[in-house]
């Protein structure tokens, strides 16, 4: 099949098969077109690329290591390699995309970054890049997420960002995204909307995947051979998209792991939300459902359109795990390897723990797993659950 | 020329929302926008968000709104225009959705998150069902897009008066009049201004700039915060009507003065 050479390239007219597009108010169409042109221009400019590479190296700490999970590998009968995005500056892969878009915003003459955040990792990364590059940052965050991620809220304000609580709807990531887009409509001249995942209107799914591609590209260079399986967690799907992009043209099997309560690919249907056509959890009328996950970063009813496409053509498989499996996975990884990962990342770990030694993940397989973030932010959640 | 007045009501916002709808008509509406509530109204400010949430919390569906409209159909004399988001249209499929509207007596459709580049399927389905898909333009819309949008428009063009969400504002945006002028270079269709128009004074100002006005949040806020009765809304709309009609009178006087050589 020729699919492997045609996947994860630049989408034609913003489409990934039947998914993607630019479903935004007319007020935002010119702004999206400007971001598209600005990104295409920057991405082909060696000076922009070298400035970003430099920041990723000396500031964000790249390349992140590919760590063999020695003890779990023995226990599970597989070779498990962890791509350590938890070791990147600010504690997750979010910094890769944020540094890219913040440099782009500055290049386009914007002075303020507007971002949505769920768990707060993207908000912290945005606040960080804003501080570094001398930009203002306004972060929209659902009231419910503010309650469960107080540490990240404090990190953002410490970095000088303004955190705006969102009280509409489910008071989580989906509502924060609505509010960030509303704020962008009101200031398209001065602000760049720094979307944190591979959703949203064209060019965001493409641009964010390209900025996250560094995860997969590094992991491929660091892998002794092409692995049998590449696995990452999927909420909106940015760390998975970046990881998969490095292996899309190989024979590696790609596996995305969704939260059971936010499984847009496994339990959703085609729909249009937040500017893109993808798979989404919704009712018969088209009202968007509220996701439910212990991991605030995966508590989202949609998914990036390229993942919907990869699922529909069979290039990637998507599995779900439950909150209980996720909590167990955090503990198992911590005690086996001395690594406390984020609840989001633990979804990928949980699937490996369940599948290893079954036909879904046969013994002897080599697995590259992207550990998208570190778990400090989740200690209060886990302590609360244990109490 | 009579300035078009298009007030708005969120379908199902209260038990008696069709009484509010009829009151808008009695107050002097030329057409009425009926909001079909969506869970994630990206282009709406806080008032329409609250109205949508309230309607959805009451268990309202597209079908229940159509049923409500069917019950008052005999009394509705002005055109009804549905205002909703793309996902509700695509969930049913554009053809089925537009037929549903047409069967309920709705003759226009506004979908704010469906720019012309994504609108082909819905436009075709609407045309088949005899529903006008009304397109929006914004101050940021460049001239080449204005030309394309104008070429594909029917009935009127909805001009977003400011770069912002829906909701009341203290003044009419400076961007409104220049936008109308730019649109008129490409079409003879009426240009209706919406977003941020709250009272009679602003309606008059918008009426001077364009061919009509849409008033939504100002009316819905009265329903949500003050429990405005249908009679209250009729008064509000009548005041807007009077402000727009006063423009015609003054325009006639200006014309007379110009013809007769007098300056008023």
Image (cartoon, coloured by chain):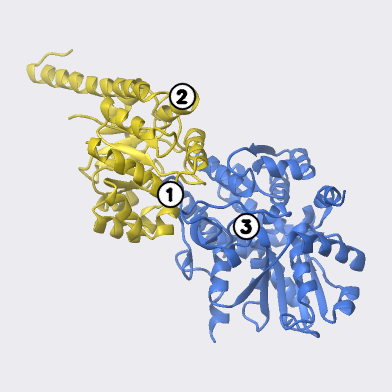
Chain colours: A blue, B yellow
Q: Which chain carries label 2?
A: B
Q: Give residue B13's mark.
A: none
Instruction: Name the residue carrying label 1.
Output: B85
Helix, strand or loop status at disc 2: loop
Q: Nearer the viewer, residue B50 or B105?
A: B105
Q: In the rendered image, which quarter is residue A367 located in?
A: bottom right
User: Up-down: is A328 above or below B189?
Assistant: below
Residue A8 appears in the picture as rendered: no
Residue at screen point 59% across, 45% down: A175
Instruction: Name the residue carrying label 2.
Output: B227
Co-location on one chain, circles 1 and 3:
no
Instruction: Name the residue carrying label 3.
Output: A197
Residue at screen point 26% across, 56% down: B129
Q: Where residue B149 sits in the image (x, y, percent)?
A: 31, 51
Q: How far apart are marks 1 and 3 (CA)?
A: 22 Å
Other-residue count near label 1 (Cα within 10 Å), few / some / many at <14 / 14–19 / ≥20: many
Q: Which of A239 and B35 is in front in this view?
A: B35
Q: Tell me if A318 is positioned left or right of B187 in this view.
A: right
Helix, strand or loop status at disc 3: loop
Q: In the rendered image, which quarter is residue B160 located in?
A: top left
Between disc 1 and disc 3, the foreground one is 1
């Amino acid at each position: 099949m020729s699919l492997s050479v045609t996947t994860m390239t630049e989408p034609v007219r913003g489409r990934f098969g039947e998914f993607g597009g630019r479903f935004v108010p007319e007020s935002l169409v010119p702004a999206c077109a400007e971001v598209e042109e600005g990104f295409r221009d920057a991405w082909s400019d060696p000076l922009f690329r070298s400035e970003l590479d430099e920041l990723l190296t000396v500031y964000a700490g790249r390349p992140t290591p590919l760590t063999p999970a020695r003890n779990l590998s023995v226990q599970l009968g597989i070779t498990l390699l962890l791509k350590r995005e938890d070791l990147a500056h600010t504690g997750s892969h979010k910094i890769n995309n944020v540094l890219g878009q913040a440099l782009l915003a500055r290049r386009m003459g914007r002075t303020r970054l507007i971002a949505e955040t769920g768990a707060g990792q993207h908000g912290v990364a945005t606040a960080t890049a804003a501080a570094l590059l001398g930009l203002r940052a306004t972060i929209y965050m659902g009231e419910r997420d503010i309650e469960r991620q107080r540490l990240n809220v404090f990190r953002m304000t410490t970095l000088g960002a303004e955190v705006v609580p969102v009280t509409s709807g489910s008071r989580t990531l989906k509502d924060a995204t609505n509010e960030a887009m509303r704020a962008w409509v009101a200031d398209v001249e001065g602000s760049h909307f720094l979307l944190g995942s591979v959703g949203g209107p064209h060019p965001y799914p493409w641009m964010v995947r390209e900025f996250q591609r560094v995860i997969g590209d590094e992991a491929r260079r660091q892998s002794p051979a092409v692995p049998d399986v590449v696995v990452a967690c999927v909420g909106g799907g940015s760390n998975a998209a970046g990881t998969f992009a490095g292996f899309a043209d190989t024979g590696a099997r790609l596996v995305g792991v969704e939260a059971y309560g936010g499984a847009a690919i496994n339990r959703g249907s085609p729909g249009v939300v937040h500017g893109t056509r993808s798979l989404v959890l919704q009712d018969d009328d088209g009202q968007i459902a509220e996701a439910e996950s212990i991991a605030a970063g995966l508590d989202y009813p949609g998914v990036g359109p390229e993942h919907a496409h990869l699922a529909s053509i069979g290039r990637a498989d998507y599995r779900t795990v439950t909150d209980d499996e996720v909590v167990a996975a955090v503990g198992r990884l911590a005690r086996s390897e001395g690594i406390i990962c984020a609840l989001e990342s633990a979804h990928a770990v949980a699937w490996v723990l369940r599948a290893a030694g079954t036909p879904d993940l046969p013994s002897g397989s080599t697995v590259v797993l992207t550990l998208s973030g570190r778990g400090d932010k989740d200690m209060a959640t886990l302590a609360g659950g244990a109490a | 020329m009579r300035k078009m007045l298009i007030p708005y009501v969120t379908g199902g916002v209260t038990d008696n929302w069709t009484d509010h709808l009829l009151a808008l008509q009695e107050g002097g509406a030329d057409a009425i926008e009926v909001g079909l509530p969506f869970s994630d109204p990206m282009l709406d400010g806080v008032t329409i968000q609250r109205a949508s949430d309230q309607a959805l919390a009451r268990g309202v569906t597209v079908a229940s709104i159509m049923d409500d409209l069917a019950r008052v159909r005999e009394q509705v004399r002005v055109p009804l225009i549905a205002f909703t988001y793309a996902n509700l249209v695509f969930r049913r499929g554009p053809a089925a959705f537009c037929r549903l509207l047409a069967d309920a007596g709705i003759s226009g459709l506004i979908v704010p998150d469906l720019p012309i580049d994504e609108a082909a399927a819905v436009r075709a389905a609407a045309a088949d069902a005899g529903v006008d898909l009304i397109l929006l333009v914004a101050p940021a819309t460049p001239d080449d897009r204005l030309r394309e949008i104008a070429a594909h428009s029917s009935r009127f063009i909805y001009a977003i008066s400011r770069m912002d969400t829906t909701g009341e504002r203290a003044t009419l945006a400076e961007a409104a009049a220049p936008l109308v002028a730019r649109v008129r270079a490409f079409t003879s269709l009426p240009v209706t201004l919406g977003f941020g128009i709250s009272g009679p004074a602003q309606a008059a100002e918008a009426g001077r700039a364009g061919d009509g006005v849409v008033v939504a949040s100002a009316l819905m806020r009265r329903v949500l915060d003050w429990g405005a009765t249908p009679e209250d809304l009729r008064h509000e709309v009548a005041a807007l009507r009077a402000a727009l009609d006063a423009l015609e009178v003054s325009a006639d006087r200006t014309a007379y003065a110009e013809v007769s050589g007098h300056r008023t």
